Amino acid sequence: MSWDKSGDPRILRRWFGDMEVKKHIYTMGIAGEIFMKNLKDKGVITGSRCDECEVIFVPPRSFCEYCFSELTVYEELEPKGYIETFTIVYEDYHGERLEKPLIIALIALPNAVGGIIHYIREVEPEDVYIDMEVEAVLKPRDERAGNLSDILYFKPT
Amino acid sequence: MKMNINLKNRVAIVGAGLTLFRRRLKETPKELAWAAAKMALESAGLELSDVDAVVIGTAPDAFDGIHMKGEYLADGSGGTGKPVMRVYVGGGTGVFTPIAGWWHVASGLFDVVLAVAEEKMSPAMPHPQSVFAHIWDPIIERPIGPNLIWIFALEMHRYMYKYNIKKEDIARVSVKNKRNALDHPAAQLGAKITVEDVLNSEMLVYPVQRLDISPVSDGAAAVVMVSEHIARRITDSPVWVEGVGWSLDTVHWTGRDLAYPKYVECAARMAYKMAGITNPAREIDVAEVYDPFDYKELHHMEGLMLARKGEAPILTREGITERDGDLPINPSGGLLGVGNPIAAAGMMKVTEIYWQLRGEAGKRQVKKPVYTGLAQAWGDLMQVGTVIVLRAG
Amino acid sequence: MDEKVRLKGTPIKRFDETITVERSSTAKYAWTAGQAISRFLVELKKGKLIGRRCNKCRRILIPPRMYCESCFRATDEWIYVEPIGTVNTAVVSYITTTREKLEKPLIIAVIEIEGTGGSGLFHYLEGVNPEDVINRKVFGMRVKAVWKPEAEREGSINDIKYFVPITGGEEK
Ligand SMILES: [Zn+2]
Ligand SMILES: [Zn+2]
């Protein structure tokens, strides 16, 4: 190279800026809307069935990614399942120690593809185990807004 | 540039699909991708299990607000468990996606490739415009506070100045395309308007007015690309990919000739060479030319050498680019009429040429018999050209 | 596909017609300016315009870069240039960056800096009327940079307030 690099901090500059997108609004889509409506109105978890592949997707999808069929059969399931896997979180976003560890689990529903990621409460971290049966604790109906926070957490059945 | 034009496999398009193009659609991005991909596969008489590989095209992640957009779209694009790649060259993406699909097949690597393009711009708030703010140099250009329309207005005005073009001759493009779009089932902005309507529409950044610009849209498009032996087996009317070309100019746009899109010419020369085209104005029967702004159709016709420099407005004024003219341009209605979900809009142009060459465009079918067609897209910081030449089988 | 085909897609006029979720993005960035642009910014603060010369193609690159993208070699030397140029193209903006209506229209131009062999700067133009832009009188006009007062400069492209026409007889 024919030029010398400057390492002088009085010369090397930084420029500050941000991403000006204020926010994003995401639609739930065809299947997602049904899932959220049913959660809000009926307190159930909804799946969609592909007869071709003999699977139920939870949360539901409007198409099957395996055979590409359109899925139009929705099934309302009890908000119950079992822990497929879990992790225990001891620190918050900023690395501060949490007062009480948080249990995060992938909750699978019987015979369904997929599952729901949520908190597990009303149990001590040392007592959680894979395959533990759990059920959803929902917000009261009139406080539900049609999003995943309508489920407060899952607890052992 | 040296290029090998003796490629292993001939490639055909054998199916195409689209969703509606609208300002706001309820479907998730992957649901849109699925709808277009499913339609394309069904029209080809193929199933997902026939697909060897998937190519996905989608523009900045910040529109949909989802990072790893290609991966996110993969299941809706038929990519689960398959070789999948995402391509992205700004506004040029929609034509670059089938170009990437083409090399997947031409190389001999795969026989059946699904090429899917999707864009959902509506999630970005308060306006997708804020996403565009990030295409400029953050230190030298963004502090000036550019609006995307500024740089196109700068380019448009230089073009008008250099060739002494009147605004009404540019406005005709918008009138033609919005009228053509009335016959397109995906169209967002098909309309019967006059040159006066364009000239009287809100002045945004002189010389750009509201009716000079394509809208913000959600939508998806897809094509199925196969090798010759598959094409011969499944259809009597394959549409052959005869040539592809792409080219990128420098990002330092302020030092460029703004009156002429050299990068489009470079891309076109590559595609023409491959297709054996020596006189494009005579040999191309119908073209879908990228038209996010009305002047861009003219600019690009010249870059594609379909018109001499500064003369595309004359061809337009004389009606040559109408559907019943000698060189129909944007019979679909283009981005100005059908809409501009970025990557999907470019791919929509490819689907239109596919249908035109098969004689399946219904009321949109151009009057003259057509054998060779072209689709072109453009993007990034006004610097990329992507061109595909198709021929009826 | 003819005009009668019914395509999939569910248009909505407003987001409250369906269930949505909102997230705000708070990504903040610190871009390093690098060798060339750092020096460029430092010089702007001093009220000077500096470029890098490529001795092969003889261009002076502004904004400067440490490499010439045409010759694909390192550029050779720093060189000050007069902040004077000609208008390559100009437009009148009636809207802000975020598309709100402007009270007083803004003129934006690409200014080809003299003696650089084609380097352009993207900046504001003052002292011309929108009519001068619309009737194309502005093309080719010689213009010069107007600097912010020294105390207000911060090492930014905005240390140049705008460019103005060089009136008849005026020398640089
Ligand atoms: Zn299935
Ligand atoms: Zn050089």
Image: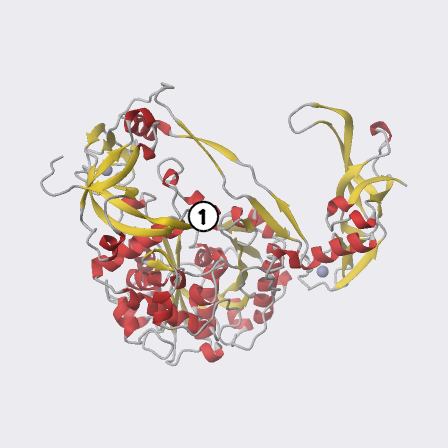
Q: Quadrant of ligand 2?
A: top left
Please tell me which residue is depicted at 26% across the width and 43% down the height of the picture: C126
| Rendering coords of residue C4 (x, y %) | 55, 77
Identify residue for label 1: C98
Q: Nearer the viewer, residue B363 or B44?
A: B363
Q: Is residue C6 left or right of residue C125?
A: right
Please tell me which residue is depicted at 16% across the width and 38% down the height of the picture: C115
| Rendering coords of residue B19 (x, y %) | 56, 65
Above or below for A68 versus C72: below
Asked whether the viewer can see residue C107, the reply is yes
Q: Is residue A136 left or right of residue B275?
A: right
Please tell me which residue is depicted at 25% across the width and 40% down the height of the picture: C163
Above or below for A58 versus A88: below
Colour scheme of the rendered structure: secondary structure
Q: Secondary structure at mark 1?
A: loop
Q: Quadrant of residue B280?
A: bottom left
Above or below for C152 versus C60: above
Q: How many marks?
A: 1
Chain letter of the residue carrying label 1:
C
- Residue farthest front in this picture: C103
Q: Nearer the viewer, residue B287 or B78?
A: B287
- Residue farthest left in this picture: C169
| Rendering coords of residue C45 (x, y %) | 30, 26
| Rendering coords of residue A133 (x, y %) | 87, 41
* Quadrant where the C terminus of chain C is found in the figure: top left
Above or below for A154 versus A4: below
Q: Quadrant of residue A84?
A: top right
Q: Nearer the viewer, residue B166 or B22?
A: B166
Q: Amino acid at mark 1?
A: Thr
Asked whether the viewer can see residue B107, the reply is no
Q: Nearer the viewer, residue B262 or B318?
A: B318
Q: Badge 1: few (under 14), some or many (20 or more) residues near its Cα, within 10 Å?
A: some
